[in-house]
Amino acid sequence: MFKRLCVIGTGLIGGSIARAARAQGLCQSVVAYGREKNLPNLQHAKALGVIDAFYTDITAALDGVDLVMIATPVGTMQNIFELLKPHWNPHTIYSDAGSTKGSVVAAAQAVFGQVPGNFVPAHPIAGAERSGVEASVPDLFQNRRLIITPLADTDADAVAKLTTFWQRIGSSVSVMSVEHHDTVLAATSHLPHILAFALVGLLGRKDEQREIFKYAAGGFKDFSRIASSDPTMWLDICLANKNEIIPLIQQLKDELSNIEQLLVNDQAEKLFDTFTYARNARQRFLDTLDD
């Protein structure tokens, strides 16, 4: 499908894209670009067989490449576009795997003046609490959603080809606007991560005095799992999408205040109704997974 894939950012996502593309025969070779300081990680990726070769020179990395996948933290996107601009090839498809799309589009506009037609913004809804190339797996995207957020002037052929690429590595592809993507992901991914970080931070400080974690049950482990996610990546995501996240935090404060008052006033019936509604809402979510 592609002759040569270049991955920029060879961590969990970038490494898994490389592994999946190779496993499905979607490219003849896979190379990676990284800076000198990331040389040990690039060497490790090659030793693991994730990539065929790596380069710290962008010109060499892009030689003969017809698909570029950017899998770096969203806060680095403008720097990546500036790096790519002098070598931008109109016959190559460029895409990303960022968890926010508005910031990525803004970065492209800042560098190019407008988003190039052969750049297709995308976001695989997949991940793990572990990070780094050693955590990458070829089936990370199997039965997971992939969102493409094309703009009005995004090349239709590039979108179609990238759609096929993701479908062949197991993803269910959806298309939505940049704005809709960031609104939805703020609620379903970004806010839950903030909640996990906040709760574990709170209990971690208590644990230093009261052995809280020693007696934590499985529910705590399940809820707190995502607090093991890469702090650098999530710092970038939260700052990039703060305009969507902050109103949700305010709404959550209201919900918690309401529950607090129900407890203060011993309003058992209303508290029961609150819990029941939440349980039923989650069941509706689980039902959508079966569709």
Image: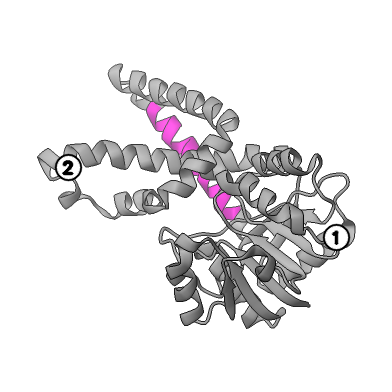
Residue 284 in view? no
Residue 201: x, y in percent? 29, 39
Q: Nearer the viewer, residue 234 or 280?
A: 234
Q: Which of 86 and 262 is in front in this view?
A: 86
Residue at mark 2: 207
Looking at the rendered image, the quarter that the N terminus falls into is bottom right
Q: Can residue 109 be seen in this view?
A: yes
Callout 2–callout 1 Cβ contact below 8 Å: no
Q: Is mark 1 on a helix, strand or loop?
A: loop
Distance (Cα) linking label 2 and label 1 = 55 Å
The secondary structure making up most of the magenta span is helix
Disc count in the image?
A: 2
Which label is found at residue 105?
none
- Amino acid type of disc 2? Asp
Q: Residue at x 53, y 60 (%)?
A: 35
Q: What residue is at 68 percent from the left and 41 percent from the top?
A: 107
Image location (x, y in percent) of residue 151: 82, 45
- Left or right: 224 with respect to 138? left
Left or right of residue 76: residue 253: left
Q: What residue type is labelled 1?
A: Pro
Q: What residue would you read off at disc 1?
A: 90
Between 255 and 112, the residue placed more toward the observer is: 112
SS for dot 2: helix
Q: Which of pointers 2 and 1 indicates the residue nearer the eye?
A: 1
Residue at 43 percent of width and 39 percent of height? 194
Q: Is residue 92 left or right of residue 171?
A: right
Specify start and end residues of the magenta stretch as a single range.
271-287
